Image (spheres, helix red, strand yellow):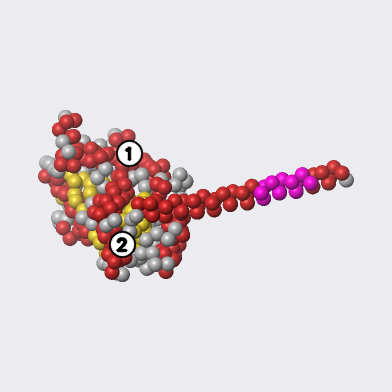
Amino acid sequence: MSQINRKKNNYKGYMLITLMLVVTMTIAGILIFFFYINRFRTVTDANWYDHYYVMITEDAKSSLWQTAYEGAYQAGLENNSYVDLLNSSFDNNYSKEDLMRIAIASDVDGIIVAADESTEMTDLINEAAAQGIPVVTLYSDNTQSERCTFVGIGSYDLGREYGKEVLEIVQEKQDSGVQISMQPDEQNSISLTTGISNPVKITVLVNAYAQDSGQNILCSGIRETIEKEKQDGIEIELSLVSVDDTNTFSAEETIRDIFMENELPDIIICLNELNTTCVYQAVVDYNKVGQVNILGYYDSQTIIKAIDRNVIYATISIDTMQMGRFCVDALTEYNTYGNTSQFFIADIALINKENVALYLGGEAEDEE
């Protein structure tokens, strides 16, 4: 009996120690949480800013979000407001929803968030609005929420730009000495012998977890532009491939699968910076340069140099600095007048081999 009692006592002792550890870790987590909240408010009070805003993004380290933050930060200083990139303030990888809760609990003067259409995000934006904190959705919207405005791009116009570039690629193939042959039994079929198939196969890489309508509108812009402006007799097949781009590894895996297939698409359209970089690397790794035309997204130096080397055909540049400024302008206007515009649309520009030297700043000539 004494041995059984000892085992029971040991078991109770282990359970007590485990419970104490859980309680200790919970208390420590709460203390750290409020430490950061107090630290945020201390920073703003010490510098006597009129407003304290926070920006919450997908990946604070990406050049896209860094540039957007720089625009917001500079615009904030001009309005005596401080903008904090909340992701970079923590060592741990908190989710956007966790960061929203921290921002709401710290009673900031405004939130800029790369949102989505999830119910949880809608509830958090509405909670912030109920507490008098205006929320600006940046780049990706939450249309069901009480956000004060959306700052992004015109999805349909972006789709039209991609559609025009698709037709430009097809036209270049024809103008470069292509032999066009009509099949006797299929008068609408054209054989392009310069490496582009008929029908021309286009793959659009879309975000697997995007719940907003932006991607659908963009793809509609691509499809409608091609159908309206393509030459008679040219058939084009447009397919969508979902990519889990929450991390680099999952995006690379999906894109690698595309290149492992027997028949590659003639054109791959990428809708974010990560996918563009991954497709560019895959084309090089699988020795498919010249066989696959890449239409990219954003203007990082890696992408710009790939255009200069004729690996990426073209990319769409988003004025992310302008997007960041628009966010602060909207918050300033809302805090001053109680309302602001429902939408702010940033400028886009096409970068291709004809103007890439302007974005390289002379590096193209230096490398040669």
Q: Which residue is drawn at 42% across and 55% down?
A: 41
- Mark 1 and mark 2: span between their CA atoms? 41 Å
Q: Which residue is drawn at 46% across and 51% down?
A: 36
Q: Quadrant of the C terminus?
A: top left
Q: Which of 327 and 74 is in front in this view?
A: 74
Q: Residue 331 carries which label?
A: 2
State which tag comes first along the sequence, 1 or 2: 1
Over which residues does the magenta segment extend? Answer: 9-20
Q: Quadrant of the N terminus?
A: top right
Give coordinates of residue 37: x percent, y percent: 46, 54
Q: Which residue is drawn at 77% across and 44% down?
A: 10
Label 1 belongs to which residue?
282
* Amino acid of disc 2: Leu
Q: Which of 20 and 268 is in front in this view?
A: 20
Q: Is the magenta stretch mostly helix, strand or loop?
A: helix
* Amino acid of disc 1: Ala
Whether the residues at callouts 1 and 2 have beta carbons within 8 Å, the answer is no
Give coordinates of residue 100: x percent, y percent: 43, 58
